Image: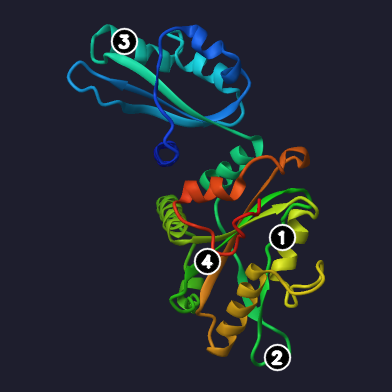
Amino acid sequence: RQEVMQNVMRILESVEVKWEHFQTWTDFSRLHLSNKLAIFGVGYNTRWREEIRYHYAEISSQVPLGKRLREYFNPEKAEGRVIMTKVQKMNWKNVYYKFLDITISEARCLELHMEVDWIPIAQTRAAGCSNGSQYLLPGGIPKTYGLYAIGYEEGSGSNSSSSTEDKDKSSPSQEEEETDHCESVEKDKRTSAKVTYCYLGIAEERTLQQCLFQHFQTSGKHYSRGEPSAVTRFLQDNCTGQAKEGVLSGLHIYIKFIEVELDFLSAGSLVECLETAIGYSLKFNKKDAL
């Protein structure tokens, strides 16, 4: 959760929203706070340093901001007791909050970035073709609407297969299984850090499954007439380029997706939202899109 909090703090700083001094509970009953979803932070300063520092930050994506802040500042709640105690003991001078209201689709977009893991896309030789390969999409892609992202990681050669000796090993002990699990978690973290986002898609007219199939199939024209999109051409070129090298050692491709109710998909500036969260531009999104 610390990583998520750091991401939220960075977003709040990048959009330059101002701190507001917490004075009364009625602050959180105001109309502009009562029914909005938002990214918010709680901060403080001391008698010794006027600079406001973060105490906490989160995305209020399920509960309206006003209700969430009232819960957070409630002395009967665990976090509220922390704040009250800090003020009473004069550790803190004042308490502040800041927020950026977001749409439901923007909240899901941030969840896609912070909560959803990348899925690697396997590749295989195209049958009967000496200079081509094809992507193998995983099963379980929803036939519903939502958001999806495509990313890549620089390749470093194909992985060597397990030896016969490894296959003949006896069942691992519980300690070995726990070690393997920890290593797997750490590997997932490293992979997430290395994957570069290049495209954010909105599955609104077609399902997530149909949109991803369109990008990753060989022709790229099954669902659309005319030329394939820039990201589809990139995927095709990457696939062909790897095959020409003789080994699958080019860019490793990843996807992630999240379901969103169709009624909420068109609201918000989704590309700008994700670009702000990741800190760089998406290579294959048109700047006026989404």
Ranked by sequence position, the earlier of labels 1 and 4 is 1
- Which color scheme is applied? rainbow
- The number of callouts visible is 4
Residue at the disc numbered 4: 152
Give the number of the disc on residue 129.
2
Ranked by sequence position, the earlier of labels 3 and 2 is 3
Picture coordinates of residue 63 (x, y %)? 60, 24
Q: How far apart are marks 3 and 1 (CA)?
A: 51 Å
Label 4: state its secondary structure: strand
Q: In which quarter of the image is the N terminus?
A: top left
Q: What residue type is labelled 1?
A: Gly
Vertical order, 101 against 115 (above or below): above
Give 60 or 181, whichever is nearer the viewer: 60
Q: Which amino acid does label 3 sit on?
A: Thr
Vertical order, 161 against 54 (above or below): below
* Label 3, residues with CA under 10 Å away: few <14, some 14-19, many ≥20: some
Label 2: state its secondary structure: loop
Q: Distance between the residues labelled 1 and 4?
A: 20 Å
Q: How far apart are marks 3 and 2 (CA)?
A: 70 Å
